[in-house]
Amino acid sequence: MGTFLVVGFHPETDKVLVLESNAAFWLDGVGYRGLGNLRDVGLQPLADWWTRSEVWTWRRIYSTYPFRRQGWLKVKDRTLSSL
């Protein structure tokens, strides 16, 4: 298991915008899970990322990584998530 950051959460769909570097999710550098590498999609993800079927829900992350360790950050500027 790797390290990733949840940079956005859309409560209505339960979707999470995950920033990581993980070859298991077709990334060969830093990128968004299900959306692609930053060099291809840009720092700002698609405006409606929560509508994409490739983007995981929190429930899926929670069940896939039951032994995960979490750290919470208080973020005031959420421009990366488009929310």
Image (cartoon, grey):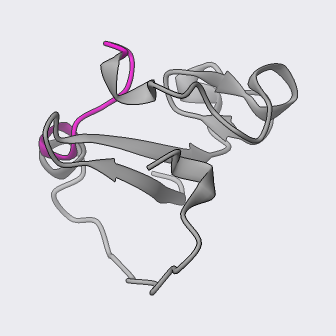
- Relative depth, front residue between 74 and 22: 74
User: Quarter of the image holding residue 43?
Assistant: top right
* Total numbered labels: 0
- Relative depth, front residue between 36 and 43: 43
User: From the viewer's perspective, is 47 left or right of 54?
Assistant: right
**Residue 20: percent from the left, percent from the top?**
61, 47
Q: Magenta stretch: dominant SS?
A: loop
Q: In the current view of this chain or complex, which residue is farthest to the right?
A: 39
| Residue at 31% in and 12% down | 53
Magenta range = 52-60
In this rendering, the answer to whether 57 lies above or below 24 is below
| Residue at 33% in and 76% down | 70
- Relative depth, front residue between 83 and 75: 83
In this rendering, the answer to whether 77 lies above or below 35 is below
**Residue 15: percent from the left, percent from the top?**
27, 37
| Residue at 49% in and 22% down | 34
**Residue 55: percent from the left, percent from the top?**
37, 26
- Relative depth, front residue between 25 and 37: 37
Q: In the current view of this chain or complex, which residue is farthest to the top?
A: 53
User: From the viewer's perspective, is 71 left or right of 68?
Assistant: right
| Residue at 39% in and 83% down | 71
In this rendering, the answer to whether 17 lies above or below 41 is below
User: From the viewer's perspective, is 43 left or right of 33?
Assistant: right
Q: Is residue 47 magenta?
A: no
User: From the viewer's perspective, is 2 left or right of 53?
Assistant: right
Q: Is residue 59 magenta?
A: yes
**Residue 66: percent from the left, percent from the top?**
15, 57
